Image (spheres, helix red, strand yellow):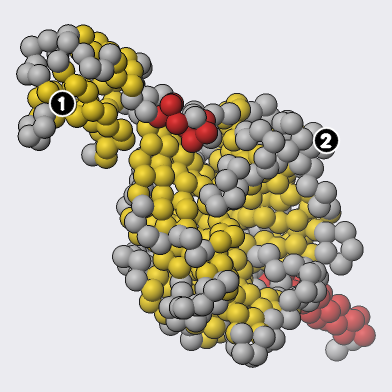
Amino acid sequence: MTWENLIFSMRHIFIFLLCSTHIYCFSQQWVKTYDMGYEANWIIEDYDKGYIILGTNSNVNYGLIIKTDVNGNVLWKIHIGNGLYEVNIQNVERTEDNGLILGGTSSKYANQEDAFILKLNSCGKLDWCSDIYTPTFYDLGVRVKPTKDHGYVFLGLLNNPDPKLRTNLFKFDLQGNLLWHQKYLPDSAAFFDDAADVLVDSTGYFITASCYYPDPGGSGGYERFYFIKSDLSGNKLWSSIYGNQTYYYGYPYNNSLVSNHGNYYSFGKHDVISSGEEHPAFVKIMQNGTQSYNRDILSNVSQGAASSGIFLNDTSLVVSCCFNLSIYNDSNKIVKIDTLGSIINTFNLPNITTACIFKMAKTFDEKCIIATTNCPSNCQIVAYKINSDLQWDSIYTRPFTYDSLCPHQIISDTIDPGCNLVVNVEEPISNPETHQMHLFPNPTKGKLTIMLPKYLVVTDKTPPVQSRTIYHQWRSTILLAYDLNGNQVFSQEIMKDQSQLELDVSSWSKGMYYFKLVYNGNSVDGKKVIVE
């Protein structure tokens, strides 16, 4: 072989090795970094196999939506706010009309924190925004989700001045109008409940929260997982304070899942009182509210929590864990487990400086996309992608079409939304007259005027959680009247826009009658009238 041929061959070998190393690096580390000064809050896979990443400025004065392709490359960005007020958006979901619904907290009005939800269309333009405005009182928006009956359910925290009514659920229609407001009050032994997450399934809503609750026969309280299951109207079906009889302590880290069998898994930390340690853990709740079991995912760590999880299939989950907790100084591990908590595989994320905030989503090809925050000095959004075997994912080379539901290219933009103020959330409670019927004259000899309530209130006092649903919108109610023997003597459907009813009772027998207003099978008010 001549020197020329040898050099030629060596060059090709070098190029081959260089290319191989380059490909190997890409296939072994799917890591993307995004805007400096922002922290990651949420991530979802979009309808076109790209990703929507949600962030908040470290100074909490801008919300950020990043749209990427399947390989994490930025396609467009939308900033929410104008830099002069707080915007902290907690999550984002695709809607049935292929827009985006976002929920969080804003201080745009009266320099106070209010929960708000914001709807964008398929091109990223503002459709509407609703702000739950509680004058002189700050409140938080925790999570918003599309519902099965064509609307949105919004989980809030501290949305009224009563310190005992901390966990609130709101239902909005497709145009952002408030339909009902549900308040959940734990029993007298529980306190400082904090709403964390809400899931939507075919039967209703599953709320994850935490609260402090005493041991049996004790006083004070320990922090515990706390769950509420409601129907599609927000009425409580059951509630459970996990570990209140078994001395189990801990709290959720904002993430719950429902299995294909209808059972619930909630991820967070287990407080081991005897050792002072905190372990990444999950608890399982059966679909009827029965407390099933709990598992420590990692028990050989001094301080830790499980911040996010996804189901890969019926038998395995992927969970993000951090441990040796201190703000912006954690170790991070992705753990694949079965539904009993047994470890199948683990994956160590690169050494980043972050708080324990990881959000994950499952991709169309059964892989995991992860968003978190790196804060060595100035915070930065970071995304990772791994496959179902917990190995670095590779880069896709085949083409994908993005944002096809928008007729034109989406351009990066800044939106400073003007929100509709929902200002009457507390009126039904602060002014009971607004949710009561009024009948006059009483007694009456002929004409009876029935003034109908402005709101409907349904209360469920079943322990350990009392719920109170306040309906702001409805189609119709049923007005019934009974004599003293319990015989029904009157029934009429009353439409929502009818504020009063004139009734001629001159032909009724003399005596006392009971008028009852019924909505969805529940009595919302009742009054007695004497006919002379």
- Quick check: 399 above or below 342? above
Residue 84, label in figure: 2
Is residue 116 at all visible to an observer of this figure?
yes
Q: Residue at x 43, y 73 (%)?
A: 284
| Amino acid identity at mark 1 | Met
Residue 137, label in figure: none
For this orientation, the residue located farthest to the right is 3
Q: Residue at x 57, y 46 (%)?
A: 162
| Amino acid identity at mark 2 | Leu
- The image quadrant that residue 259 belongs to is bottom left
- Depth check, front residue: 188 or 339: 188
Among numbered discs 2 and 1, the one appearing first in the sequence? 2
Q: Residue at x 75, y 62 (%)?
A: 373
Q: Position of residue 48 (x, y in %)?
A: 54, 48
Disc 2, disc 1: CB below 8 Å? no
Label 2, label 1: how far apart the Cα atoms are = 61 Å
Q: Position of residue 382 (x, y in %)?
A: 74, 61
Residue 23 relative to residue 221: left or right: right
- Quick check: 112 above or below 291? above
Q: Crowding near pointer 1: few (<14 within 10 Å), some, many (20+)?
A: some
Q: Secondary structure at mark 1?
A: strand
- Depth check, front residue: 144 or 242: 242
Q: Which residue is mark 1?
A: 512
- Depth check, front residue: 210 or 427: 427
Q: Secondary structure at mark 2?
A: loop
Nearer to us of marks 2 and 1 is: 1
